[in-house]
Amino acid sequence: MVYNMETEKERELIIMVDDDPVVLRAGKNSLSGSYRVATLTSAEKLFSFLENNIPVLILLDVVMPGMDGYEAIRILKANSKTQGIPVIFLTGRADAANEYEGLSLGAIDYIIKPFVPALLRKRVEIHLLVEAQKKILETQRQALQNFNSDLQRMVEEKTHTVINLQNAIIKTLADMVEYRDNVTGSHVDRTRRGVSILINALKEQDRYRDQVANWNIEILLESSLLHDVGKIAIDDYILKKPGPLNIDEFELMKKHTDFGVQVIEKIKSAAEENEFLYYAKIFAETHHERWDGTGYPFGLEHGEIPILGRIMAIADVYDALVSERPYKEAYSHEKAVEIIREGRGTQFDPELTDIFVSVADMFREP
Ligand SMILES: [Fe+2]
Ligand SMILES: [Fe+2]
């Protein structure tokens, strides 16, 4: 809009509606010193006038031929374009019941005719002041609301950045362990994929559906990347040994579950307890437990082993079988599935083994 000094200087418009020209003239005389006053002789004329003019205030008679003032205020208040215009009744109906009715319909004041010009001016002035203050308050409320949503957006952006950073650090930690482990390819990425396939299959089973619904799967899958993080504390000569481990070496290798828990506990002591660390600890601690109780570190059996540990056991072993290691060649997918099937009820949870077999095709390289 072009800035217009004339418009800016223009006085505020008040509309006065009354079927009595004498009243209109008296009203105009008392207000026109401070305002532009448009005088109209019926409610019908008011509505056609409002099509092109929005006043700061309407002074409205009640009893008029045609539409009366009560009907007129109802229409004004029902229209979003006019409902904000303050209305004052200016009427000869002096009884309390009518005054109550007029104020209940949304008028901000009810003035009895004949009026005292100076008092009419004063009351109009006070009402317009209150209206102006209401507008200022509304502007401030709006500004505060905008400020709040800006603040909220900034917090969300920061949170997003922190989560990205956290995921990048976790991934780097897992990659560092793999680099030392001499494992070719990305074992942790592939076991995460295997865990994801098994969890999706579990969702379809009545017996597991409720349990899976309680998991935050996105966080859970990220945390699975740390299941072998304890290998960071295992000596190079064991990790990089180009053949099978002897009994003593294997005992040391088994310690990677304890070390993994220690690493996660250390993070826990610096950060707040959270879902990510909760899942990460379960994976690191229990992925080498066996269904028959001969696994490590605790020798838990059957349902004593957390289900996430039982799931990871299958995904972890599958990937170890199909991968080439310094001490073994890579087995085919079919051979790996067969070996896991043979471990049903000894190494692996029998139900989870069946579920694995039913979706095993999805474990093939994508
Ligand atoms: Fe492991
Ligand atoms: Fe592993």
Image (spheres, rainbow, N blue to C red):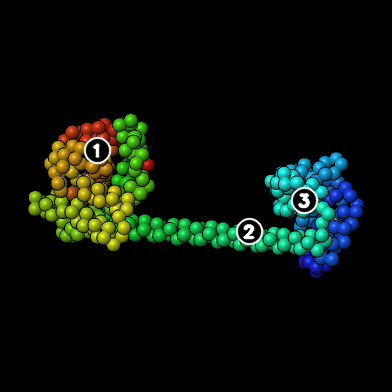
Residue 66 spot, x, y in % from top left: 85, 40
Mark 3 neighbour density, 10 Å: few (under 14) some (14–19) many (20 or more)? many
Is ligand 2 within 8 Å of the beta carbon of the residue shown at mark 2? no
In the drawing, does residue 138 fall left or right of residue 55?
A: left
Q: Of tags 2 and 3, which is closer to the observer?
A: 3
* Residue located 31% across and 38% down the image: 211
Q: CA distance from mark 2 to mark 1?
A: 69 Å
Q: Which mark is residue 93?
A: none
Q: Earlier in the sequence, mark 3 or mark 1?
A: 3
Which callout, 3 or 1, points to the residue nearer the camera?
3
Look at label 1 and name its amino acid.
Ala
Quarter-of-image position of residue 342: top left
Question: Disc 2 residue type?
Answer: Glu
- Between 92 and 257, the one nearer to me in the picture: 92
User: Label 3 sits on what residue type?
Assistant: Phe
What residue does disc 3 label?
A: 89
